[in-house]
Amino acid sequence: MFDVVIAGCGPTGAMLAAELRLHDVRVLVLEKENEPASFVRIVGLHIRSLELMAMRGLLDRLLPHGRQRPAGGFFAGIDKPAPEGLDSAHAYLLGIQHPVVVRLLEEHAVELGAQVRRGCAVAGVEQDDEGVTVELANGEKLRSRYLVGCDGARSAVRKLLGVGFPGEPSRTETLMGEMKAGVPQEEIAEKMREVGDASKRFWLRPFGEGIYSVVVPAAGVSDRAQPPTLEDFRHQLRALAGTDFGVHSPRWLSRFGDATRLVERYRVGRVLLAGDAAHIHPPTGGQGLNLGVQDAVNLGWKLAAQLGGWAPEALLDTYHAERHPVAEDVLDNTRAQMELSSTEPGPRAVRRLLTELMDFDEVNRHLIEKITAIDIRYDFGEAREPNDQHSGAGPDLLGRRLRDVEVKQGRLYDLLHRGRGLLLDRTERLTVGGWSDRVDHLADPTAALDVPCVLLRPDGHVAWVGDDQRDLDAHLSRWFGEPVTSPRRS
């Protein structure tokens, strides 16, 4: 019997498997495909995802395989520079091949002890008070204490669970692919400037080595049930720009719509959902993969705590409480971005107005922080003083992730590789006492903080700010359960 079976070995499933293995959870990952995807697609890891990779010691693995570029111009493709002084030590976008991300995360999970089985499609799910029975397409039955569906937009787990998936069906179809072009980049850039105002769902963006990301409307092109062809792209490019730019040698071609849906519940008993199995939306802004990886890191330590027997009551339910509103916000901002891509006079006028407003630093910063997920503040239900400064001190930090600050041992995120909580203590007076099996303690009066002490959850979010031991103990109990022994008092 496994502790957790994960359906789907994409970025979300692989990341979750690794998070669980940090806590010695017995994990089996089922992937319905026999082989990893052969097509090469470039994805962008946003700031918050890069921070999470740094927290787990994975960033150095990823960086050699990607290209860094400034964290700007994401919202609806409006070309504005990245704001200065973003509150992160990793304030850039990493363009990287999707199969590389999956491979590196899967390798990490396997190194930690996760098992991965390919060619295994989930065909049935039954749960009871003790666990979950997972039936595979070949008739084999597996038993686990929990099941997590990370099996994508057409999730078999979600369908078998019968969870509502409300939202809007696709109204607009778009072709997207990566291919080479037969004309100079300068000529492409000039034509883009000429045609760009007429269609916001049209671009050729260089990736280097002669490869371009190509996006064109799909209206009137082939049957949506059939995969697009290179000729479909050529036809649409000629219709929009008067030239097909000599595109050739495609690496991958796809069609996507603007369907937008969000599950009603992330958890039903012993079955949970994460990533595209829980939410789908257009790829504008490049948030999908990032949202799934962030789901995995939020869920991993909570599910491990439940399995380890030390989870406070309702800790596992905070996964839905925290991540569902985040997904709602992503769905809303992608809806807005898709409206701004319309060629209708009204949306075009709104786009021109927003383009002007983004010249104000506050507006540009707000939208970039939203897209890159560094603006997230989980609602912990505690009173906070009004404070509009994202990097502010005290109550404003509560519920936010803490940036990778300097500490006497180097960098803060280097202390989070094991997926444990952390007390960063500038007073050198506090203790984690009976929680030391779950929470590390660094006494460092030199830490680059504007507050006396912070308690970090394993996902890097601030669970407590202060300098009082009794108050700290209460928050340790809230997030990390009962102490093994009575904590020492100062």
Image (cartoon, rainbow, N blue to C red):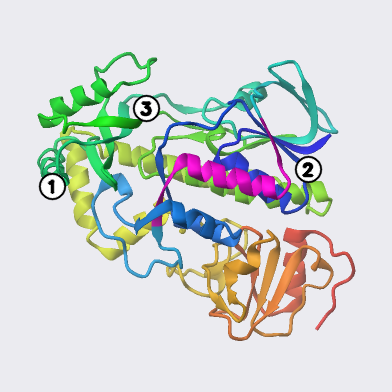
Q: Residue 215: where, in percent of width, then height?
A: 27, 34
- Identify which amino acid the numbered label 1 is placed on: Glu
Q: Compared with residue 123, is residue 280 higher up or lower down, i.e. above or below? A: below
Q: Nearer the viewer, mark 3 or mark 1?
A: 1
489 and 381: which one is in front?
A: 489
Among the 4 quarters of the image, the one containing residue 195: top left
Q: Residue at x 72, y 66 (%)?
A: 475
Spatial separation of the CA atoms under disc 3 and disc 1: 26 Å
In the figure, is residue 73 to the left or right of 458? left
- Identify which amino acid the numbered label 3 is placed on: Ser
Q: Quadrant of the N terminus?
A: top right
Say if mark 2 contacts mark 1, CB within 8 Å. Answer: no
Q: Secondary structure at mark 2?
A: loop
**In the rendered structure, does residue 116 fall within the stretch colored magenta?**
yes
45 and 457: which one is in front?
A: 45
Q: Which mark is residue 407?
A: none
Q: Which residue is mark 3?
A: 254
Q: Residue 152: where, in percent of width, then height?
A: 54, 31
Tag count: 3
Q: Residue furthest right?
A: 485
> Is any atom of residue 212 visible in this view?
yes
Q: Which residue is mark 2?
A: 26
Q: What residue range appears in magenta?
A: 93-117
Q: Secondary structure at mark 3?
A: strand
Q: Quadrant of the C terminus?
A: bottom right
In the figure, is residue 185 to the left or right of 110? left
Q: Compared with residue 20, is residue 132 higher up or lower down, i.e. above or below? A: above
